[in-house]
């Protein structure tokens, strides 16, 4: 069940990522929805699921891009695993801790991703700090909002059902 | 830290997935030498395995060959000991040969002394007085002649230079009254002094009573006076007269016919007398 939900989350994130990219200027996206999905799955399901989700999402993302297959997968695997560990070891139920986790996970992902490319001397990144910070903030915001939405969505249905039943009485 | 404790199943799985990613990346990325990184890393790891196996194999082989070699070493050691003993014997023989060579070298030195440097000279004059048995030769100091140089002939001792001039020299013959030379009787090795008597004969003096002398014995120079080279013929004993056990008169017939002497050889090789004379002059 977890696997199916993870795969679904990644698929939706990939679809949104590729769809939104067409409407953004210069083709760059300040938010990595796939990474947000991975961290979300890791925080909600644990390190193993987060790690496997990160591996799957990263490899798919690498395969769809023109980069080296495995670098994005490796970065998202590490991030997913560590986010899962943090999610199991700490209480990450409030927006601020979640923001911090998403923010940190994005920075870690950027460091690993760009670091590997630089290490392999395959790509140069000119002053990536601002872009990385911007993406970290964006991912954190999206992630916190996504958490709130998902958590509020089941309660809203129940509350609507309860409100409807009270009105009928 | 419990957070990063990878000793759980998830930790091993995480390491496995990371390793899988690294392998996947390495398969796509070339190293700076152009070789795929996966191949390079694999080769590097395998080469270390090869190195380890080679080291192990070499060690085992060395131990094995050393063990096998020890058996040969025993035989080799015995052979070397035997060779050493033979070499020591050969060394002794060589040392003995060296001693003999040194002895021969001394003899050779002696022969070298005998093989003297000489300068031929022609007799251009004789003494105006019969009391002095001297001759004049056509070589002088300009030819390297000095006082007390010996004069010889193919027959034997002639005399010595007494007065050298620039282009000529006066030679005192051995038969002169004032001439003398150390002598040895070749057969008995008896030593004495040959002196001139102003005639065509010589006299052997200072011979011990125990000396064994007979007529016909060859008398040679002993070189003891430092002028004449050793071993050159002086003459032969012509007559021996005894007075009791002591020798009264020993007459020596010179080997050189002084009356028919036309050419002589001047010994230019330095002799002790020459060196002493030079030292005194300096």
Image (spheres, helix red, strand yellow):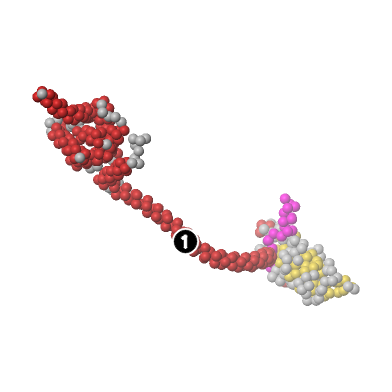
Q: Can I make out residue B239 in this image?
A: yes
Give the residue drawn at x 27%, y 39%.
A48
Read off the magenta span: B262-282
Q: Is residue B277 above or below residue B106?
A: above
Q: Quadrant location of residue B182?
A: bottom right
Give the residue drawn at x 25%, y 30%.
A102
Q: Quadrant location of residue B260?
A: bottom right
Q: Position of residue B83 (x, y in %)?
A: 58, 67
Q: Position of residue B266 (x, y in %)?
A: 69, 63
Depth check, front residue: B182 or A116: A116
Q: In the displayed image of the protein, which residue is found farthest to the left?
A: A168
Q: In the displayed image of the protein, which residue is found farthest to the right?
A: B244
Q: Is residue A11 left or right of residue B64?
A: left
Specify whether residue B231 is painted magenta. no
Q: Position of residue B231 (x, y in %)?
A: 73, 68
Quarter holding the N terminus of chain B is top left
Q: Which residue is mark 1?
A: B64
Label 1: which secondary element: helix
Check disc 1: other Cα within 10 Å, few if <14, some if 14-19, many if 20+: few
Label tally: 1
Q: Can I make out residue B133 in this image?
A: no
Q: Position of residue B89 (x, y in %)?
A: 63, 67
Depth check, front residue: B263 or B76: B76
Give the residue drawn at x 25%, y 37%.
A50
Give the residue drawn at x 68%, y 57%.
B141
Depth check, front residue: A98 or B39: A98
Q: Is residue A46 left or right of residue B194?
A: left
Q: Is residue B59 above or below residue A115?
A: below
Specify whether residue B273 is painted magenta. yes
């Amino acid at each position: 069940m977890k696997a199916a939900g993870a795969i679904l989350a990644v698929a939706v994130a990939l679809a949104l990522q590729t769809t939104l990219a067409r409407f953004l200027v210069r083709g760059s996206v300040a938010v990595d929805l796939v990474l947000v999905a991975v961290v979300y799955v890791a925080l909600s399901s644990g390190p193993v699921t987060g790690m496997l989700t990160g591996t799957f999402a990263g490899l798919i993302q690498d395969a769809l891009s023109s980069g080296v297959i495995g670098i994005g997968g490796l970065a998202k695997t590490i991030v997913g695993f560590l986010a899962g560990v943090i999610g199991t070891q700490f209480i990450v139920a409030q927006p601020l801790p979640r923001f911090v986790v998403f923010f940190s996970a994005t920075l870690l992902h950027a460091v690993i991703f760009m670091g590997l490319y630089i290490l392999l001397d395959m790509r140069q990144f000119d002053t990536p700090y601002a872009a990385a910070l911007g993406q970290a903030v964006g991912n954190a915001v999206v992630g916190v909002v996504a958490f709130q939405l998902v958590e509020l969505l089941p309660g809203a249905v129940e509350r609507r059902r309860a409100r409807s039943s009270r009105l009928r009485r | 830290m419990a957070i990063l404790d990878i000793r759980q199943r998830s930790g091993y799985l995480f390491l496995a997935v990371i390793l899988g990613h690294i392998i996947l990346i390495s398969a796509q990325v070339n190293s700076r030498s152009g070789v795929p990184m996966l191949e390079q890393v694999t080769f590097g790891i395998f080469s270390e395995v090869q190195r380890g196996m080679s080291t192990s194999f070499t060690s085992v082989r060395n131990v094995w060959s050393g063990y096998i070699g020890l058996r040969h070493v025993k035989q080799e050691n015995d052979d070397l000991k035997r060779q050493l003993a033979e070499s020591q014997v050969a060394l002794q023989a060589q040392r003995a040969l060296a001693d003999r060579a040194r002895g021969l070298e001394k003899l050779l030195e002696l022969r070298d002394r005998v093989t003297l440097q000489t300068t031929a000279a022609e007799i251009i004059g004789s003494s105006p007085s019969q009391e002095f048995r001297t001759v004049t030769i056509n070589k002088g100091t300009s030819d390297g002649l000095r006082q007390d140089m010996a004069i010889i002939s193919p027959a034997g001792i002639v005399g010595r230079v007494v007065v050298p001039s620039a282009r000529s020299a006066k030679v005192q013959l051995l038969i002169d009254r004032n001439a003398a030379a150390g002598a040895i009787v070749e057969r008995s090795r008896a030593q004495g002094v040959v002196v001139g008597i102003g005639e065509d004969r010589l006299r052997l003096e200072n011979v011990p009573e125990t000396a064994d002398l007979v007529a016909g014995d060859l008398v040679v120079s002993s070189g003891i006076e430092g002028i004449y080279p050793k071993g050159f013929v002086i003459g032969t004993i012509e007559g021996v007269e005894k007075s009791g056990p002591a020798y009264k008169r020993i007459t020596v017939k010179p080997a050189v016919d002084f009356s028919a002497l036309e050419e002589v050889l001047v010994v230019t090789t330095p002799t002790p007398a020459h060196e002493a004379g030079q030292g005194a002059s300096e």
